[in-house]
Amino acid sequence: MIVPPPLRAGDVVALVAPCGPPDPVRLARGARVLEGLGLKVVIGAHALDRDRYLAGSDADRAADLQEAWCDPAVAAVICARGGYGATRILDLLDWDALRAAGPKTLAGSSDVTALHRAFAVELGIASWFGPMPACTTISDPGGPEPRSFGHFSAALFGGAPPITGDRVIVPGDVVAPVTGGNLSLLAALCGTPYGLRARGRIVLLEDVGEHPYRIDRMLTQLLRSGALDGAAGFVLGSWEGCGDPYPTLEERLAPLGVPVIAGLPVGHGSPQFSVLLGALGAIDAESCSLTGSIIDPVEAV
């Protein structure tokens, strides 16, 4: 994957809403937080539209994303929030035009997993899985959650520190490109051109509000589809509102015989750290950590 260049003070970032409708007050707060980093913020024309559980029509959400990505003045496209809707716009994007625009930063998480997968397949670009400006860790009235925002800022500007978990399920160390994201979205992408292919990669998994039996069902789908064949390792993020998912996660993943670490603050909840999907990462079981080993704009092998 091509790692896009880090941001610099004065760069223009575009906030778009390809998924669910963001709260306008939170979006404005999040924009001000980013401006406080010395960035110039523009907001997509349809970011505050609403169509039931979507941030406007599929065509308008796709148009905002495409316009931002293809604008040569824009250095980063940051998704306002998750929710639902990213999978609906994948076939409305002009991938040739997006490819011609060259590499730049894409950031977001949760439902944005669909965009991370599509941008990886179509454009070969690494992208940031992390907090979003209209969500709690960035846009709370009292200000952003300090650890989340500090890590996110470091990620955008090219120096994110390692992320430490709290349990080792299967010991071992491995260096490989990182892929994955939200488990529900990865299961939903099975059978599409953007389905997960884990061979030779470290797989990030996280979710929110899913009972253990549903986590079991989604993992079983990924396993039976072959999506997890040849995985080099697993890093398990947050499982907010999921009860105790660890017996299920261990039962389904430990037999694969590759390193598995868990409890990393990635996904939902607080703090929420950032992972560069597509770039090389390193699992260190002794410190129960994931380290991003490539932060410069070079091609990862």
Image (cartoon, rainbow, N blue to C red):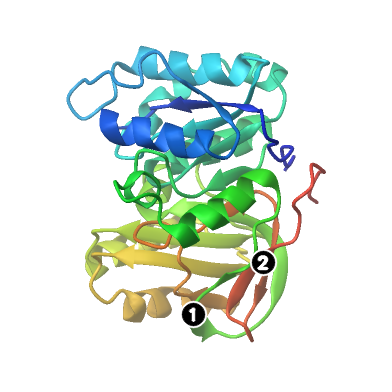
Splitting the image into 4 quarters, where does residue 221 fall?
A: bottom left
Q: Nearer the viewer, residue 10 or 236?
A: 10
Instruction: Compare marks 1 and 2 and give the one earlier in the sequence.
Output: 1
Q: Nearer the viewer, residue 22 or 126?
A: 22
Report the residue marked by disc 1.
Answer: 254
Q: Residue at x 65, y 57 (%)?
A: 160
Q: Residue at x 69, y 78 (%)?
A: 173
Packing grade of label 2 (10 A; few <14, some 14-19, many >=20) is some
Specify whether residue 31 is in view: yes
Query: Is residue 273 rendered to the left or right of residue 282?
Result: left
Q: Amino acid at mark 2?
A: Thr
Report the residue marked by disc 2.
Answer: 291
Residue 1 against residue 22 in the figure, above or below: below
Q: Position of residue 259 (x, y in %)?
A: 60, 77
Q: Secondary structure at mark 1?
A: helix
Q: Residue at x 45, y 16 (%)?
A: 64
Q: CA distance from mark 1 to mark 2?
A: 21 Å
Q: Secondary structure at mark 2?
A: strand
